[in-house]
Image: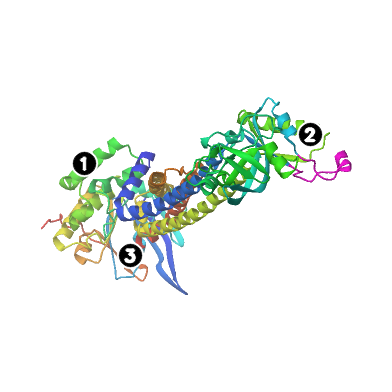
Amino acid sequence: MSPVDTLRFATRAALGYPQRTALMMLAMSIGVAAVVMLTALGDGARRFVVEEFAALGANLLIVLPGRNETGGVNPGSFVSSTPRDLTTDDAASLLRLPQVKRVAPLAMGSAEISFGGRLREVMVLGTSADYVDIRGFGVARGQFLPREDFRRASAVAVIGETIRAELFGNQNAIGRMIRLGDRRLRVIGVMGPAGRGLGMNSDELVLVPVATAQAMFDTNSLFRIMIETRDRESLLPAQREVEKLLGARRQGELDFTVITQDAVLGTFDRILGALTLGVAGIAAISLAVAGILVMNVMLVAVTQRTGEIGLLKALGASSRAIRLAFLAEAALLSLAGALAGFVLGHAGAWAIRLAFPTLPAWPPDWAVSAALGTALTTGLLFGVMPARRAAALDPVQALTKR
Amino acid sequence: MAQIELEGIERIFRLGDSEVHALNDVSLRIKAGEYVAVMGPSGSGKSTLLNLLGLLDRPNSGHYRLEGRDVTTLSADEQAAVRSARIGFVFQSFHLVPRLTAAENVALPLMLAGVPVAERSARVQRALKDFGLESRAHHRPDELSGGQRQRVAIARATIMRPAMLLADEPTGNLDRATGQEVTALLEALNAAGTTLIVVTHDPAMGARARRHLLMEDGAIRQDLRSTPAATPDPS
């Protein structure tokens, strides 16, 4: 039997039993579509979070005081046991590095704010002019902290929207003097609506120059130093340079930690990747169910057609020709079903994107290829296995079997 | 040399614990061009004999030489090749493939043998014309009458120009007039030189054959040769 004849015979057979073909294609396409759609959803969620992070400033380095990992004994261990503070001089020195674009030292504490008899406790963040750009926050009214030396304790403050509303109500806040802790500061700006920041809500924050905050809390240390590099490529070189520079400033003792935004991002990426995998697992179950349905349909189909197999043998068909014909038929059916599922799944993902425009619901390639591969494999396997058995029967047995 | 030589053929079926001797030491020689009717009560082994002659079944012991070649020892696919080239089958229930048209059913053996499409359609056209089925070429079996179906089956059985035609109750599912029509068709093919072996219950049909094998309990009880029957009358 020539390949063209085999294919034509298989096509006729597939089309000759429309109900079975439709049933099998339905099962197959639902399985594949489930995988494509669910993974699109999971991966869309992952991508959504990753992109949100990227918007927040992907080329960000954060310097924390203290050691991150336990190392062996080094000379520094004998000199001091407590980590040395990060200082504004450290932060200023970082500005000299070529890869560094912006530096914002952070000092934090809480203080009482008061204006016109109203009091409340607020988080005070001492930082510098670049902070607003590094975090991508916006200033709604007035201006942000002035660009000046980190050591200069100007008596100004920028307040969050919630605090402005609570203290000033409908009054204009710009230019007013407030009391913060033991200092009197002039309000020079109001932050815009909260930017997306991890756990830090700019609405309830009072921002002051870093030296002002340090004086207020009577400390020289910094809570953190945020560094923005020139571009993504210089992130890792900058991390090394920052470590080298700060290390040199403290006689080789690395009692600080430099982490990248990517490290935080990577954690989320892994968590959500696992979520996608879990969803894919659920989808795989539906694919397996589809496979079992396909197996049943093919089993019944081949059993019904045992007589036909017997006839073909009586007419001189070799076992190989029969196996090939059924293989081609199963291949056609699974291919059609898988393709239908592929189209259906993409249509579903498209509908999700339409309904939730912020969610980039694109199925990942690995899930699509796994779904198609599984569908084709089960279709072929379960199509061919019963046919092989029927082809191996004596012709007379196959002929008389009903 | 006879076309068909059977020697000590045994065929045993196992049904649970008991063994059924469907064929018991059958020896038989049939020459090319003979017209043989196999008759006998149900369960006498007629169909088993026909299946063995058609290489659809294998004997438990004994030898079957077809045209001088021992075919019992051939592999399944070698037997399929012999069936394809030398043997045509006509079944009681026609065994047409329901989803294929008459022409496609007739073309099946040619397709399985790998005959090119152009030659195939020419031969199918001729066969359909010979059997008066031209107008039915593109009808499916369920759109054909019983007689037409059996004619399609006969066209299919003879399309490879086999040396022998094996018919198992070819008129069993047909009314009397159509049955005679089909019988006449088979006899015409036999007259053209094809060996014709018919299994039948119908004494009228059996009487028309020139040789009668009467079977009973898996053995041939009688082997009668009669004078050639009168020219088939198509009434």
Looking at the image, residue B83 sits to the left or right of residue B204; the answer is right
Q: Nearer the viewer, mark 1 or mark 3?
A: 1
Residue at horizontal 55 percent and vertical 33 percent from the top: A143
- Label 1 SS: helix
Query: Mark 2–mark 1 contact, CB under 8 Å?
Result: no
Q: Is any part of residue B72 visible from this angle?
A: no
Q: Which quarter of the figure is the N terminus of chain A placed in? A: top left
Q: How far is mark 2 from mark 1, CA to CA? A: 98 Å
Subunit ID for the residue under disc 2:
A
Q: Amino acid at mark 2?
A: Gly
Please tell me whether residue A76 belongs to the stretch shown in magenta.
yes
- Residue situated in front as seen by the camera: A159 or A65: A159
Gap between marks 1 and 3 measured at Cα: 33 Å
Q: Position of residue A117 (x, y in %)?
A: 58, 50
**Residue of label 1:** B126
Under circle 3, the secondary element is helix
On the image, the x and y values in percent for residue B68 come to 41, 49
Quadrant for residue A69, please give it.
Answer: top right
Quadrant (top left, top right, bottom left, bottom right) of the C terminus of chain A: bottom left
Q: Which residues are magenta?
A: A65-85
In the rendered view, tell whether residue A303 sits above or below residue B108.
Answer: below
Q: Residues within 10 Å of mark 2 (few under 14, many from 20)?
A: some
Q: Would you say A216 lies left or right of A170 here?
A: right
- The chain carrying label 1 is B
Q: Position of residue A219 (x, y in %)?
A: 75, 42
Q: Is residue A84 above or below residue B187?
A: above
Q: Position of residue A112 (x, y in %)?
A: 64, 49
Residue type, label 3:
Lys
Check disc 2 and report the residue beneath it.
Answer: A247
Q: How many marks?
A: 3
Q: Are marks 1 and 3 on the same chain?
A: yes
